[in-house]
Amino acid sequence: MVNPPPSCVITPAAATNCVGGSTSFTVQITSGTAPYTVVLSGCISETVTVTAQNGSVTRSHSCTSPGTCTLTANITDSKGCVSSPCSATHTCVPNPTCVITPAAATNCVGSSTSFTVQISSGTAPYTVVLSGCISETVTVTAQNGSVTRSHSCTAPGTCTLTANITDANGCVSSPCTATHTCIPCVPCIKVYKQVVCTDATGTNCLAFSSDLNSQKSAFGVSTVDALGQEHCSAFCYRITVTNCSEAGIELRNLVVTDTNSPGGAFSLGNCFPTTLGVAGSANSSASCIIPAVTICDNTENIVTRDGCWGHCCYE
């Protein structure tokens, strides 16, 4: 009597999973005589005994890294008859990953920041689901492509932008995030006026106080007016403007105008920059000195380009 050899087939014959996923493969035996010895090799290395006639064995293979392997089964029955090998392939594909830049941004209310979601790995096309600061679903067709969206600050507060990526194989990324902080950004600028007399030449300014709040001057050459009041014969005044806004706020389009001039308001634009840097930075303050000003008949305690009257000129 001739004993037929066993035969086998593995199902599924091919499977694809994302890294982290798995597939169960079943080796189905036909013919031959039980019990069977099933030797698995390739994706899985194991020897299994199947006692049932025309029985089967099922094993799971997990994807731990991208790549392809072949699962092979060789069957020997109780009569020593051997099957032809049967096989199946398992392909493990990478998951997409993402990163959002910038990872954090701060803007004044009324301003905005553009955030870019950069995709790596996986297989295009990708479905990008944005949530949090922006709610939108976007399709990115390019391999390792990106999507950029702008978020505007409409009110003070902080939100988180989250992106979840699904690729053409159904593989899913871990979420990537960025934060956007919106602040009121109320501008603040301080203006200081200081006065000093000139020296005996009538043209050179004496030293200004380092204390911007000090308007007192040191007499150089003085004169007495018709009312018996003592004045500097000539003086200099310094205007200093300083950015006192909240951290991170730059002041732009700066225009400085002297409104106290008897001849009418005039701009000091050629004496000041148009931008003051953020508070505390090297360019957050600027000064302009108007030298060798003569006395005029001005009864207000103010400094003008043409003169000064009152205690601001005195010790």
Image (cartoon, grey):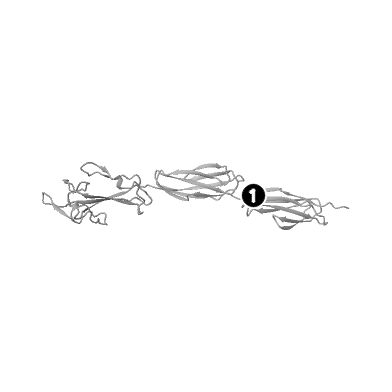
Q: Nearer the viewer, residue 53 or 280?
A: 280
Apparent side of residue 34 relative to residue 312 in the rendered image (left or right): right
The spot of residue 106 in percent (x, y) is 42, 49
Q: Nearer the viewer, residue 249 or 241?
A: 241
Identity of the residue furthest to the right in this view: 1
- Residue on which the image places disc 1: 17
Q: Amino acid at mark 1?
A: Asn
Label 1 element class? strand
Quadrant of the snapshot with the C terminus: bottom left
Is residue 12 among the parts visible in the rendering? no
Q: Residue at x 73, y 53 (%)?
A: 72
Is residue 105 among the parts visible in the rendering? yes
Apparent side of residue 199 relative to residue 57 in the rendered image (left or right): left
Q: Nearer the viewer, residue 311 or 184?
A: 311
How many dots with numbers? 1
Please tell me in which quadrant of the rendered image residue 142 appears. top right
The spot of residue 193 in percent (x, y) is 25, 50
Mark 1, other Cα within 10 Å: few <14 / some 14–19 / many ≥20: many
Apparent side of residue 253 relative to residue 263 in the rendered image (left or right): right
Q: Nearer the viewer, residue 268 or 118?
A: 268
The spot of residue 189 in percent (x, y) is 31, 49
The spot of residue 77 in percent (x, y) is 80, 55
